[in-house]
Image: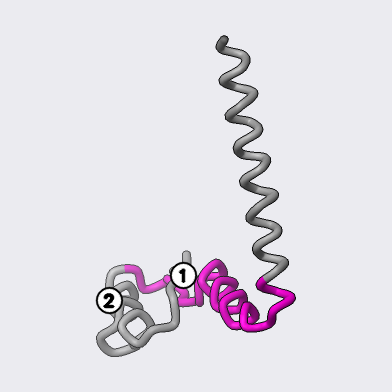
Amino acid sequence: HGQGCDGCVSMKGHISGVQAHMIKVYPQAVYMLCASHVLNLVIAHASKVQAVTNGIGTIKEVIRLIRDSAKLINIQEKC
């Protein structure tokens, strides 16, 4: 059993944070940082580098193209 949370004090506080309340209810629960939240923090920090910002923008454009293409194909199939 585990619990994934961000690293803010209200979540990880061992006295009055969510972690402390969870341990009272589920004594076997293990506290760990949420991998998605950690990844988001890393990307936010790295986005200060122009090459990373450009790369993320390109990835978003490719995702939008694929998503919009699938919607267009679906519309064409219905006609």
Query: Callout 2 environment at 10 Å: few (<14), some (14 to 19), or many (20+)?
Result: some
The percent coordinates of residue 5 (x first, y second) are 43, 73
The percent coordinates of residue 34 (x first, y second) are 51, 71
Residue at image coords 47%, 74%: 30
> Which quadrant of the view contains residue 51?
bottom right
Residue at image coords 66%, 42%: 65
Query: Callout 1 environment at 10 Å: few (<14), some (14 to 19), or many (20+)?
Result: some
Q: Which residue is mark 1?
A: 4
Residue type at mark 2 is His
Q: Which residue is mark 2?
A: 21
Residue at image coords 65%, 48%: 63
In this rendering, position of residue 27 left or right of residue 61:
left
Residue at image coords 50%, 76%: 32
Magenta-span inclusion, residue 52: yes
Locate the C terminus and report the quarter of the image it occupies.
Answer: top right
Residue 79's disc number: none
- Disc 2 is placed on an element classified as helix
Could you tell me how far apart the alpha carbons at marks 1 and 2 are, in whole angstroms? Answer: 14 Å
Total marks drawn? 2
Disc 1 + disc 2, Cβ < 8 Å = no
> Which quadrant of the view contains residue 8?
bottom left
Residue situated in front as seen by the camera: 2 or 68: 68
Highlighted range, magenta = 26-53
- Disc 1 is placed on an element classified as strand
Q: Which mark sits nearer the N-terminus, 1 or 2?
A: 1
